[in-house]
Image: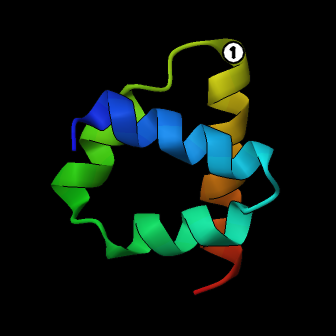
Amino acid sequence: MASDQVKANMLQIVKDGGLEDVLAVVRQMTAAEQTKVFAEFQSDEEKATLNEILKLMRKTP
């Protein structure tokens, strides 16, 4: 799946209350895949969502 599609899916899942589900998906990605997907987060709202995902990743190993 293309990175922009992955980002769109992730944002929809977060919107539906599935932040933990997004976290599980991100943890299954390689570092290169994460980099490509994270680069797709461009707007301020998307960046805020990405920050929430990253904060949760740091909190829960």
| Quarter of the image where the C terminus is located | bottom right
In the image shown, does 55 or 22 lie closer to the viewer? 22
Compared to residue 2, the image places residue 34 above or below, namely below
Compared to residue 47, the image places residue 24 above or below, namely below
Task: Name the residue furthest bottom.
Answer: 61
Residue 5: image location, x then y, percent: 36, 34
Residue neighbourhood size for the residue with mark 1, other residues' Cα within 10 Å, grouped as few (<14), some (14–19), many (≥20): few
- Give the residue drawn at x 41%, y 73%: 27
Residue 29: image location, x then y, percent: 29, 66
- Give the residue drawn at x 33%, y 75%: 28
- Give the residue drawn at x 71%, y 49%: 14
Callout 1: SS: helix
| Quarter of the image where the N terminus is located | top left
Is 34 on the left-hand or right-hand side of 10? Answer: left
Amino acid, disc 1: Asp
- Give the residue drawn at x 64%, y 26%: 46
Task: Name the residue furthest top.
Answer: 43
Is 22 on the left-hand or right-hand side of 31? Answer: right
Task: Name the residue furthest right.
Answer: 17
Compared to residue 7, the image places residue 47 above or below, namely above
Count of numbered labels shown in the rendering: 1
Q: Mark 1 highlights which residue?
A: 44
Is 11 on the left-hand or right-hand side of 24? Answer: right
Residue 15: image location, x then y, percent: 77, 43
Colour approach in the figure: rainbow
